[in-house]
Image (spheres, helix red, strand yellow):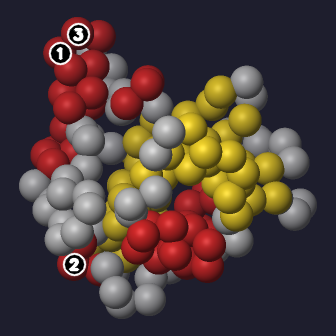
Amino acid sequence: MFKFISVTVETIKIVAEWTYDGFVKSVYVTPYFESIKADKILKGPDGCDGFIAYIDGSIAGLLEFYFEDDIMELGIALNPIFIGKGLGKEFIRQGIIFGIEKYNYNKKFIKLSVNEKNIPAIKAYQKAGFSYYKKNGDIFEMRKEIEY
């Protein structure tokens, strides 16, 4: 259903224009533009790898992969035009599969971080099998066990 392709300057410019109602207003893409200027390599926040998810030829989302202590962490942003259409759980599921295959990942779990006020994202992550692990200030770390 989703096809994942590395971000380009052109696609990250499109993501930069996304705006949301509610707690989150936009996707944090500044590091992509800074990295390409400084290092000529397109990297996202904290040096993550970014991938654009396509569905039926349209940009459906942004998926980012970070690694801390060899644990995969996801950054997820669904295109606002697809929010509320029932795609979130499948986007997350297929993104996890893509990441596991891309990085030959074989650890017990993956994680993500989300602000406690971002209720729509928390609900989507719970539907995709993530559960609360710990809290640091207003940020929840959520984890999902991986079944191989």
Q: Could you tell me if the residues under marks 3 and 1 are in contact, i.e. CB atoms within 8 Å?
A: yes
Residue pictured at 44% horizontal, 24% vertical: 47
Report which residue position mark 3 lands on: 38
101 relative position to 22: left or right? right
Residue pictured at 56% horizontal, 38% vertical: 136
Residue pictured at 46% horizontal, 57% vertical: 116
94 relative position to 78: left or right? right
Q: Position of residue 56 (x, y in %)?
A: 33, 80
56 and 140: which one is in front?
140
Using the numbered discs, state the Cα–Cα distance from disc 3 to disc 1 in whole angstroms.
Answer: 4 Å
Task: Report crowding for label 1: few under 14, some 14 to 19, many 20 or more residues within 10 A (C-alpha).
Answer: few
Front label number (2 vs 1): 2
Report which residue position mark 1 lands on: 37
Using the numbered discs, state the Cα–Cα distance from disc 2 to disc 3 in whole angstroms.
Answer: 32 Å
Q: Amino acid at mark 2?
A: Ile
Report which residue position mark 2 lands on: 81
Dot 3: what SS?
A: helix
